[in-house]
Structure formats: C-alpha cells, structure tokens
Image (tube, grey):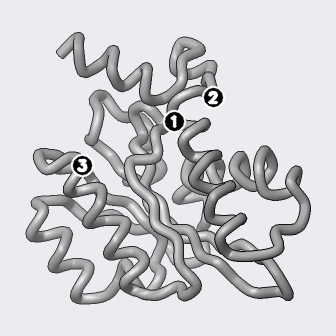
C-alpha cells in the first residue's frame, strides 16, 4: 500500500490491527479490528483474552460475512497472525490482496493506529479503571457503535462513517 491511505470506493482498502487493554488486576484484553479507508468505518471487530490467530480470524471472517463481495487490499502489520499460512489462505479464498507494513514501522498503518488513539483517548482513558472483562468489552462495543454511527468526521463532510457509507452506497 506504500502509505497511500486514499480510497476511491468502499471496500477498496481495509486496514487491520490488534491492540491491548488492561482491566481488573492488570489482566489483558485484546481488540482486533478492520477499518475501511474510504469511510473510516470499523468493518468488524472481535475481543478476547488472548492475542492469537482465532481473534484475528474471527474479525476477518465477520468482515467477509458482512461484505461477501468485497475484494479489498488488506493491509496489516507483520504480526504473527497476519503472516501465518492459515491467514494467507483466508485472504486467497476471499480474493483479497495482502499488503503489509515494513517491520517496526507503525506509521505504515497510520489510520489504524490513529483509530486506536481515538478509541483509547475518548473511551478508555476517560473512563478510568475497568474492574472486569465484561465492563470493558461493553464499553468498547458501545464506543465502536458510537464511532460508526454518531461520531462526526470532518473528512466525511461532517458525517459519521456509516451515514457517509450509506450515502455512497445509494449513489452507486
């Protein structure tokens, strides 16, 4: 992708990554998500207590089930899940082209990293400490719904991602 974060149409370029949260007594939760570069929407996400293949595969499978005709360039970092033979087979089966960041270059996945920053600043850090997995999971689900359906973005004509997406779909 070479840091070309522009997209001419929906489902042309998807970015993916996994981030970590802490809750309870220093326990970890992992959030995997896929972002569409055209409208900045979170196409799919999954949470779990382990940063493993299943987490990334579930996120990917959900995205494919929501948009079965999508054939985006699929960009990620070089995490072990994304470099696995099993994941490459999933991409091939879905007819997607794989793109990866250079090693150690988070800027190569800038918009995805930017989303993590927004999520953590606007939801996670402001809410303080989460006592348990379920309360953190609920807060993340609620925030992603807010982000997709209510949080306006200047770049999207001051519309939320899903409203912008619907306008593009109806115009097509």
Q: Is residue 111 left or right of residue 91?
A: right
Report the Cα–Cα distance between label 1 and label 3. 15 Å
Count up the numbered dots: 3
Mark 1, secondary structure of its residue: helix
The residue labelled by disc 2 is 151
Residue located at (33% from left, 63% from top) = 99
Residue located at (10% from left, 60% from top) = 95
Report the Cα–Cα distance between label 3 and label 2. 21 Å
Q: Is residue 116 left or right of residue 82?
A: right
Pointer 2 with pointer 1, Cβ within 8 A = yes
Could you classify mark 2 by the number of other residues whose Cα lies within 10 Å: few (under 14), some (14-19), or many (20 or more)? some
Residue 128 picture quarter = bottom right
Near-viewer residue (71 or 144): 144
Whether 51 is drawn above or below 104: the answer is below
Pointer 1 with pointer 3, Cβ within 8 A = no
> Which dot marks residue 111?
none
The residue labelled by disc 3 is 66
Q: Earlier in the sequence, mark 1 or mark 3?
A: 3
The residue labelled by disc 1 is 148
Image location of residue 77, percent across then percent down: 48, 71
Q: Is residue 159 left or right of residue 95?
A: right
């Amino acid at each position: 992708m070479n840091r070309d974060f522009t997209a001419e149409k929906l489902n042309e370029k998807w970015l993916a990554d996994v981030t970590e949260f802490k809750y309870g007594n220093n326990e970890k939760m992992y959030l995997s998500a896929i972002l569409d570069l055209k409208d900045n929407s979170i196409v799919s996400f999954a949470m779990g207590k382990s940063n493993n293949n299943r987490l990334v595969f579930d996120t990917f499978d959900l995205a494919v089930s929501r948009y079965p005709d999508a054939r985006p360039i699929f960009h990620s970092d070089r995490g072990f899940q994304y470099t696995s033979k099993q994941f490459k087979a999933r991409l091939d089966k879905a007819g997607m082209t794989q793109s990866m960041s250079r090693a150690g270059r988070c800027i190569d996945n800038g918009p995805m990293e930017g989303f993590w920053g927004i999520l953590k600043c606007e939801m996670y850090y402001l809410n303080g400490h989460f006592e348990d997995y379920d309360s953190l999971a609920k807060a993340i689900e609620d925030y992603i719904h807010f982000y997709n359906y209510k949080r306006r973005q200047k770049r999207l004509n001051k519309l939320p991602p899903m409203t912008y997406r619907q306008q593009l779909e109806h115009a097509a």
